[in-house]
């Protein structure tokens, strides 16, 4: 496997990052900007394995769902299916795909946590047309600022702002777009408009309408029935009053579809076991809401840069029986399920820098109120209330060639079952203490070494505590899952390597994560608990990211590999494929940008002995942006995903296969 990955790396290419940054006085075009609490850094100067998918990459990918964005990131794998409503994710072996499996991954949209757990219903619902940036921080080193339990890492998504739509010197601007994809057969349109009449006020309104079709495999067979119409809105406004700032935003995704598969992660699965009629079809409403109000205060004092944020997020699934009597949904899986979360967060970033060094200290506190409800009594979706309080502090210190980051997060959680949970009335209290330290040392202008150590505690979720599906007993005695993660790495960047003004950047990260009291599902009837703790498990692997820019040509590589086992030496079932993502982009002229991307994955043997074969999937794209004449301001994008119509099943899928060939086209106009 090592020789295979090395061969892939030598011929590889990952999306380059065409954004100019200045590091140590040198302008770099391709080193990714990473948003930190104190100051922005570039990826080669951050002691963590991190990837950024920026605006140019999003335009090249032209994603129809968030999964197509994250497929480009090393160490991240999709779980379940390519359905718009069946998206779940795996980072470094964390995330197995049904319910509660994404609790080791913190998902953030515009600073607010998005988490939904409902049996076979997906976990993240995002309109990709509104995204401008996705940052993936692998490993638990980001849990201090983003939330406890990030054993796998953090997915942080940002939506467009007014400044992304308004041309220099103008007070307003916008963009309209129409698009089509063949698999799933999807038609969509969007319009976004930004307004900034003066330096103190800005606002944005965006609307997108998406008609989703069925996802099909390489033979044209339907994998998941997901026919639905999805209107989505995004609203933002910001007003400054001297040193004060008030910001409000609201976004909502809503989709309704008739005779959709209940199981949006795997499809009908008729005959999965003898006599099984499938999971059934139903009329399904999916609604995802994110509302936030933020006050900021940034006076002249370097010690004060404070924000207080009140937010509300909720994901709703309302499932009703479909029209096909031969494919009924079990009564316990019907009804409406809400996952409402109120959060109050206050933090301050103090600039403690002095002559010879820079030092930023972020400190804050959070209060969380989460209510999980169901209109139908269901052992697979137990009702419960969760209350949590956290305090955190994160220090970023830089002096000369050394950067040292330290952090600590302490959180306490109380979970109380709802009245509909009849097999347990236990109230469960849990604690999380998460220290971390990371350092990077610049050996020269080109070379840096880094390392980190972090401890993360993932407290049990509602599903894990009170799920009684298929007769399993409740699991109120679960212990908190603890991870101890060590990372070491090396980064290199240079200019004028093989040609004048060319640039290259490489970052290599190796990790080892020791998990004690790992929570796993037993799939056994009562009196055996539905979930138990394993004594320990181990995950080890690494990521290699490289990029090269010369003239109009961008090349790069993203390689990821991971292995894991429990205390008995049994292979963990959640391991993704070892893989390399290769790509090249060529700005052929001022108007034409051409590119290709390949994903090459090694085979993986599952814990039950099932062998998932390796695969190679190739995508191509072309974008035309006229620079003059009546078509100026337009952008025509053409693309083909899975060009060879490859039949394959990723190791993280419960079953298969993945989607077949997809033709896509879009036309956008800025105004």
Image: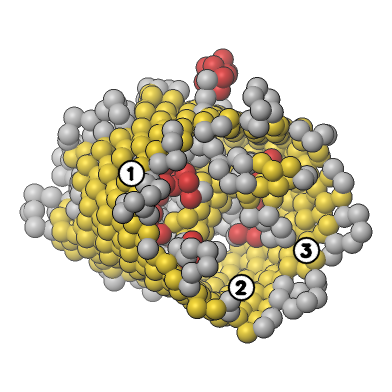
Residues at discs 1 and 3 in contact (Cβ within 8 Å): no
Residues at discs 2 and 1 in contact (Cβ within 8 Å): no
- Extreme residue toward the bottom, this view: 241
Disc on res. 649? none
Q: Determine the secondary structure under disc 2.
A: strand
Q: Residue 265, image x and y in percent?
A: 31, 46
Residue at 84% across / 65% down in the picture? Answer: 352
Q: Residue 7 falls in which quadrant of the image?
A: top right
Q: Residue 114, image x and y in percent?
A: 47, 61
Q: Could you tell whether 498 is left or right of 222 in the image?
A: right
Residue topped by disc 1: 637
Q: Residues within 10 Å of mark 3 (few under 14, many from 20)?
A: many
Mark 1 vs mark 3, foreground winner is: 1
Residue topped by disc 3: 361
Q: Residues within 10 Å of mark 1 (few under 14, many from 20)?
A: many
Between the residue at mark 2 and the residue at mark 3, the CA separation in whole angstroms equals 16 Å
Q: Nearer the viewer, residue 414 or 236?
A: 236
- Extreme residue toward the front, this view: 629
Q: Earlier in the sequence, mark 2 or mark 3?
A: 2
Residue topped by disc 2: 345
Q: Earlier in the sequence, mark 2 or mark 1?
A: 2
Q: Determine the secondary structure under disc 3.
A: strand
Q: Please tell me whether residue 652 is drawn above or below residue 358 in the rendered image.
A: above
Residue at 56% across / 32% down in the picture? Answer: 551
Q: Earlier in the sequence, mark 1 or mark 3?
A: 3
Q: Determine the secondary structure under disc 1.
A: strand
Residue at 48% across / 73% down in the picture? Answer: 171
Mark 2 vs mark 3, foreground winner is: 3
Q: Residue 286 falls in which quadrant of the image?
A: bottom left
Q: Nearer the viewer, residue 177 or 297?
A: 177
Residue at 38% across / 49% down in the picture? Answer: 628
């Amino acid at each position: 496997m090592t020789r295979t990955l090395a061969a892939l790396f030598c011929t590889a290419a990952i999306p380059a990052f065409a954004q100019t940054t200045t590091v140590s006085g040198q302008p770099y075009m391709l080193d990714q900007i990473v948003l930190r609490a104190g100051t922005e850094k570039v990826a080669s100067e951050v002691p963590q394995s991190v990837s950024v998918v920026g605006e140019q990459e999003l335009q090249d990918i032209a994603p129809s769902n968030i999964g197509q964005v994250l497929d480009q990131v090393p160490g991240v794998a999709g779980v379940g299916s390519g359905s718009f409503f069946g998206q779940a994710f795996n980072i470094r072996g964390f995330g197995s795909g049904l319910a509660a499996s994404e609790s080791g991954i913190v998902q953030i949209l515009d600073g607010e946590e998005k988490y939904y757990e409902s049996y076979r219903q997906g976990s993240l619902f995002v309109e990709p047309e509104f995204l401008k940036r996705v940052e993936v921080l692998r490993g638990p080193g980001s849990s201090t600022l983003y939330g406890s339990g990030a054993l796998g890492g953090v997915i942080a998504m940002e939506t467009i702002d007014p400044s992304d739509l308004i041309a220099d010197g103008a007070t307003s601007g916008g963009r309209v777009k129409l698009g089509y994809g063949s698999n799933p057969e999807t038609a969509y349109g969007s319009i976004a408009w930004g307004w900034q009449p003066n330096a103190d006020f800005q606002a944005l309104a965006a609307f997108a309408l998406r008609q989703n079709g069925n996802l099909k495999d390489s033979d044209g067979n339907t994998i998941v029935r997901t026919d639905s119409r999805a209107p989505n809105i995004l609203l933002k406004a910001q007003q400054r009053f001297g040193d004060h700032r008030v910001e409000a935003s609201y976004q909502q995704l809503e989709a309704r579809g008739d005779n959709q598969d209940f199981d949006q992660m795997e499809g009908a699965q008729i005959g999965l076991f003898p006599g099984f009629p499938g999971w059934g079809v139903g009329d399904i409403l999916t609604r995802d809401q994110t509302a936030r109000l933020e006050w900021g205060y940034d006076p002249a004092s370097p010690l004060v840069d404070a924000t207080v944020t009140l937010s509300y997020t909720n994901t709703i699934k309302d499932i009703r029986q479909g029209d096909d009597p031969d494919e009924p949904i079990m009564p316990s899986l019907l009804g409406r399920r809400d996952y409402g979360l109120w959060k109050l967060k206050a933090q301050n970033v103090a600039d403690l820098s002095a002559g010879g060094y820079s030092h930023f200290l972020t400190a804050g506190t959070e209060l969380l109120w989460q209510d999980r409800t169901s209109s139908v009594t269901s052992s697979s979706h137990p009702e419960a209330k969760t209350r949590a309080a956290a305090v955190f502090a994160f220090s970023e210190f830089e002096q000369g060639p050394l950067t040292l980051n330290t952090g600590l997060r302490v959180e306490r959680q109380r979970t109380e079952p709802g009245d509909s949970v009849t097999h347990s009335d236990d109230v469960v209290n849990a604690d999380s203490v998460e220290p971390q330290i990371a350092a990077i040392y610049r050996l020269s202008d080109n070379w840096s070494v880094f390392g980190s150590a972090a401890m993360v505690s993932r407290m049990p979720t509602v599903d894990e505590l009170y799920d009684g599906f298929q007769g399993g007993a409740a699991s109120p005695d679960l212990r908190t899952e603890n991870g101890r993660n060590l990372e070491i790495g090396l980064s290199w960047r240079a200019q004028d390597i093989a040609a004048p003004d060319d640039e290259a950047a490489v970052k290599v990260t190796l990790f080892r994560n020791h998990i004690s009291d790992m929570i796993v599902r037993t799939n056994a009837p009562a009196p055996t608990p539905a979930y138990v703790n394993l004594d320990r498990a181990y995950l080890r692997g690494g990521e290699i990211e490289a990029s090269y820019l010369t003239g109009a040509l961008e090349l790069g590589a993203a390689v990821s590999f991971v292995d894991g086992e429990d205390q008995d030496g049994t292979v963990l079932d959640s391991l993704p494929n070892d893989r390399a993502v290769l790509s090249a982009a060529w700005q052929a002229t001022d108007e034409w940008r051409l590119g290709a991307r390949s994903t090459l994955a090694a085979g993986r043997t599952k814990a039950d002995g099932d062998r998932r074969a390796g695969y190679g999937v190739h995508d191509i794209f072309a974008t035309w942006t006229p620079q003059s004449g009546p078509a100026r301001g337009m952008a025509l994008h053409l693309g083909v995903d899975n060009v060879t119509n490859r039949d394959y099943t990723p190791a993280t899928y419960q079953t298969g296969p993945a989607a077949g060939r997809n033709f896509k086209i879009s036309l956008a106009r800025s105004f």
